[in-house]
Image: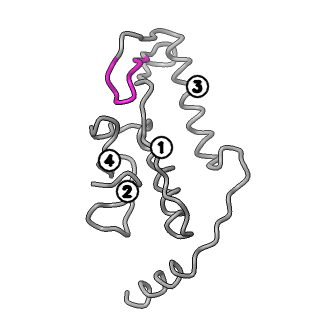
Amino acid sequence: MVDATMRSASHPDVYAVGDAALAMGPGDKPLRMSCASGTPAAWQAAAAIAARLTGGKLPNVSIRYFNQCISLGRRDGLIRYVTADDRAVRAVLTGRLAAVYKELICGSAAWGVANPTLGMPTRRRRVTRERAAAGEAVKATA
């Protein structure tokens, strides 16, 4: 179990994302195991870790869904549109157009992994003295 910043409820020095985490999403329902959950959860955890180390503001962004994608080969697919809390709506996309759509999503995800700052300059943050001292104390006791 993790909180909204992907921090373990039982071990506050541990963060978990993706299939390793049980995180609650919109409507207090567990996030589904998917890249649609894992990628935003990783961004959330990274921002929370940086904020805690630098004394910054913790992120407060809920993970929301737009669709569910299934590839059925290179020329066929299914895109089911959903509400923010992952409930299916009537809109659906099928066939070759759905396969192309899914390919664009996968390509965008791969680009996002290769470009974690999303093409923006990196943000540099200074570690606060209190956090650095706490980190040294933890290392000394280990």
Q: Report how far apart the C-alphas of labels 4 and 3 lie in the structure.
A: 27 Å
Q: Residue at x 52, y 10 (%)?
A: 96
The reply to whether discs 3 and 1 touch (Cβ–Cβ < 8 Å) is no
Task: For label 1, count other residues whose C-alpha is less than 10 Å away and answer few (under 14), some (14-19) or many (20+).
Answer: some
Q: Residue at x 30, y 68 (%)?
A: 11
The region drawn magenta spans 79-88
Q: In this view, does 137 lie to the left or right of 113?
A: left
Which amino acid, by three-letter code, is at mark 3? Leu
Residue 1 at x, y percent in the picture:
27, 54
Q: Where is residue 51 in the image (x, y as percent from the top left)?
A: 53, 63
What's the residue at 36%, 15% (across, down)? 89
The residue indicated by pointer 1 is 40
Identify the mark nearer the N-term, 2 or 3.
2
Q: Rounded to the nearest whole Å, what is the CA distance between mark 1 and mark 2?
A: 12 Å
Label 4 – label 2 distance at C-alpha: 9 Å
Asked if the residues shown at circle 2 and circle 3 are in contact, with their CB atoms under 8 angstroms apart, the answer is no
Residue positioned 58% across, 39% down in the render:
110
Q: How is the protein colored in the picture?
A: one colour
Give the vertical position of 89 relative to 105 (above or below). above
**Residue 16: assigned label:** 2
Residue tagged 3: 104
Circle 3 SS class = helix
Q: Which of 30 and 19 is in front in this view?
A: 30
Q: For this rendering, which residue is in front, 55 or 101?
A: 55
Q: Is residue 39 above or below residue 15?
A: above
Instruction: Read off the residue under disc 4.
Output: 23
Q: Nearer the viewer, mark 4 or mark 2?
A: 4
Report, in whole angstroms, how far the alpha carbon at label 1 lies from the one at label 4.
12 Å
- Between the C-alphas of marks 3 and 1, the distance is 18 Å
